[in-house]
Amino acid sequence: MVEHEAPANWQPTQEGNFYVFYRIVETDPPTVTDFLTASARGRNISRKATPQRLDDWARRISVFQTADRARAAELAMRALRPPHPIGDFIAMLLIPVNSQDVAWKATPPVGHFTLEAAPSLLLDCVHSVVAI
C-alpha cells in the first residue's frame, strides 16, 4: 500500500524513525471511530466534488502537519454558520517511516495530508492527545 506523495518543500515532520501527524478526534482517548473515513462516518460531500476529492472522502482521513494547523482547522469549522465541529481533541500520531501499511499524501492546503490505513492501525499509532 505504500504511497507517499508530496512536493519536496511539503513533507511531513519526521522525528527519528516516525512521521508525525495530527488528527482532530472526538474523544480522549480516541476510538476506532475517530479514524474512519468521512464516507464511513456518514458525512456528506458536495455533489460538485472532483473525482480526487471523492476518492479521498471514501478512502482516506485528514491529518495535519502541526497541532496548531489542526486546531486552526477545527476553529474554522466551528466558525461556519451553521457550525460543523469535528472534535474537541487533537491526537498526535507517530507513523513508522518504514511502514508498509500506511500511505500518506500531501493535499491542499499546505500542511494538510491524507492517510490511508486500517482505522485500528491508526488508533495504535496514537502517541498523545490534547484538548483543542
Image (cartoon, rainbow, N blue to C red):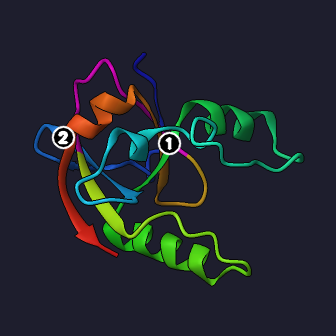
Q: On screen, 64 above or below 31?
A: below
In the foreground, 96 or 4: 96
Residue at image point 35% right, 49% down: 12
Horizontally, residue 108 falls left or right of residue 122, namely right
Residue 62 lies left or right of residue 27; in this view the side is: right
Q: CA distance from mark 1 to mark 2?
A: 18 Å
> How many numbered marks does the figure carry?
2
User: Which of pointers 1 and 2 indicates the residue nearer the eye?
Assistant: 1
Q: Where does residue 14 sit, x and y in percent of width and height?
A: 22, 48
Quarter-wise, where is residue 55 in the image? top right
Could you classify mark 2 by the number of other residues whose Cα lies within 10 Å: few (under 14), some (14-19), or many (20 or more)? some
> Mark 1 = which residue?
61
Q: Residue 99, position in %: x, y?
A: 25, 23
Give yes or no for contact between labels 1 and 2 (Cβ–Cβ under 8 Å): no
Q: Which mark is residue 18?
A: 2
Task: Find the magenta span and give its range.
Answer: 94-106
> What kind of element bears circle 1?
strand
Q: Amino acid at mark 1?
A: Ile
